[in-house]
Image (cartoon, rainbow, N blue to C red):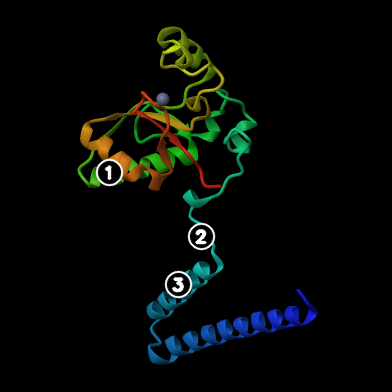
Amino acid sequence: MGIEAVNNRIADIQSRMLALQTQQATRTTTSNTTTGAPGTTSASGASFASALADAMGTQSTAATDKKYTLNSKGIPTELAAYGNGKIPASALEQVGNTRHKLWAPAAQSLNKMIADAKAQGVTIGITDSYRPYSEQVDLAHRKGLYSQGGLAAKPGTSEHGWGMATDLDLNSKAQTWMRANADKYGFVENVPREPWHWAYKPKT
Ligand SMILES: [Zn+2]
């Protein structure tokens, strides 16, 4: 790119910024003079903020939208530091009023999903969740290794050991609902032969 092209590009960006600033000033003035009602003013401010967020390609800052850095195996680095099956209680959160726990962001998203499904007349039960290392060893003995036709991951590798997978009790209506909606909550059906197993994929 030549120097002239660069100058043109800078001028273009400056004029866009100016247009955006003018737009903002106009909106603020309009809302203040035409209504004076605080509610309307803040609504206008909110819509400007969301328009700006759209323009900037950013997302809202709700807790479930927090982004995580994953290691090469797709595990959030803050979890990987603890080790599979060794997640401290402080990083886990209860699912509803059950005895089940998941990594806190996964539990929060699952709780929201279960509540939303319930509001639509769909019941999602839960049969398994975070699995400490000792329970993974026990399960491998009882159910056999997946690689050998069984249903258990090699101890120390299970998604349950990261608190990032849950086994759900789904009737056919709930299974259909999950396949249509779960990805909105970050859950994916990712193990063949296990339609009950849903893994949480945090935003990155
Ligand atoms: Zn599972």
Q: CA distance from mark 3 to mark 1?
A: 29 Å
Of residues 39 and 71, the one nearer the viewer is 71
Mark 3 and mark 2: Cα distance apart in space? 14 Å
Dot label at residue 117? 1
The answer to which of 148 and 112 lies nearer the viewer is: 148
Q: Quadrant of residue 128?
A: top left
Tag 1: Cα neighbours inside 10 Å, few (<14), some, or many (≥20)?
some
**Residue 87 screen position, x and y as percent:** 56, 28
Disc 1 is placed on an element classified as helix
- Residue 65's disc is none
Q: Pick the residue in front: 24 or 189.
A: 189
Q: Residue at x 48, y 55 (%)?
A: 62
Residue 200 location (% of width, % of height): 46, 37
Q: Is residue 92 above or below residue 11?
A: above
Residue on which disc 2 sits: 59
Q: Amino acid at mark 1?
A: Ala
Q: Residues within 10 Å of mark 3 (few under 14, many from 20)?
A: few
Given the current orientation, which residue lies at the most extreme front position?
A: 2
Residue at the image position 44 percent from the left and 73 percent from the top: 47
- Count of all numbered marks drawn on residues in the image: 3
